[in-house]
Amino acid sequence: MKVAIFDFDGTLFPKETFPLLMGHLKNHPVHFQKYRNFFLRILPVYAAYKCKLYPEQKFKEYSMWSYIAAFGTSPKVEVEQFFSQIGEIMSHNLSESVLHRLQQHQSDGYYTMLVSGAYEPLLHSVTKNVNFDFIIGSSIPYTDEKLPKKAPINYIYGERKTASINAHLSDTEVDWENSFAYGDSYTDLNVLELVGNPVAVNPEPRLLEVANHKKWEVI
């Protein structure tokens, strides 16, 4: 089986997701008061991160947790509805060139995967009209259909992406040499190096340097 693996932020979706999520929470007609809790929780950690006292990966993971923690013990249906609303907006702004590649791979019989650090319910909402065979994202834990206090977030980032991909495909014989992967960030490097056909999508400078050195396709 050949696979085609797509990143979300900066790849399928041309922008970064988290700033949009912050704005959605801040201006939401129902949940706007939760933004203050999120902001106060993240502010000291953000200051430490900007002073290079807090690693980037840990800061992103803390940000993801702080965002969900602002919802307290909200019911699952309420959280899912929140993500559905912004997902609907974002779904109209997907990259046409990346969607075209996705459709090509689907026509050629590839097993298609969306692998991202974004929240899983957001990914499912954004792509409800886009047919991926499997989606891997940062999962939100629920207890009895509610958010538990201090809910941990399984943030999918860096090596966790490749671990999740390999775990999902562990019972499948994959033709990695003829498979494809798409990403925009240096942190996507582990996934891009899994396949014989890595594609850098509007890459950031560090990834562009690697792509040029290795003669990867750049779109």
Image (spheres, grey):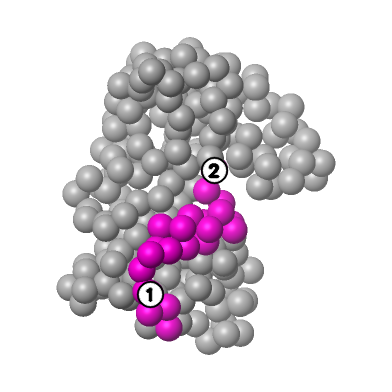
> Does residue 183 show up?
yes
Figure check: 47 above or below 79: below
Residue 122 included in the magenta stretch of the image:
no
Disc 1 from disc 2: Cα separation: 25 Å
Instruction: Judge left or right: residue 119 versus residue 97.
Output: right
> Does residue 89 show up?
no
> Which residue position holds label 1?
174
Tally of numbered discs: 2
Question: Which residue is found at the position 29% from the left and 32% from the top?
Answer: 84
Amino acid tagged 2: Tyr
Which quadrant of the structure image shows residue 74? Answer: top left
Residue 76: x percent and y percent? Answer: 35, 22
- Residue numbers of the magenta segment: 155-177
> Which residue position holds label 2?
155
Question: Which residue is found at the position 63% from the left and 68% from the top?
Answer: 206
Label 1 secondary element: loop
Residue 103: x percent and y percent? Answer: 22, 68
Instruction: Judge left or right: residue 23 versus residue 101.
Output: right
Which quadrant of the structure image shows residue 214? Answer: bottom right
Figure check: 117 above or below 163: above
Amino acid tagged 1: Val
Residue 165 included in the magenta stretch of the image:
yes
Question: Which residue is found at the position 65% from the left and 19% from the top?
Answer: 40
Question: Which residue is found at the position 30% from the left and 25% from the top?
Answer: 81
Residue 96: x percent and y percent? Answer: 27, 62
Which badge, 1 or 2, is on the more N-terminal residue?
2
Q: Characterize the local packing of mark 2: few (<14), some (14-19) or many (20 or more) Cα atoms within 10 angstroms.
A: many
Residue 175: x percent and y percent? Answer: 38, 79
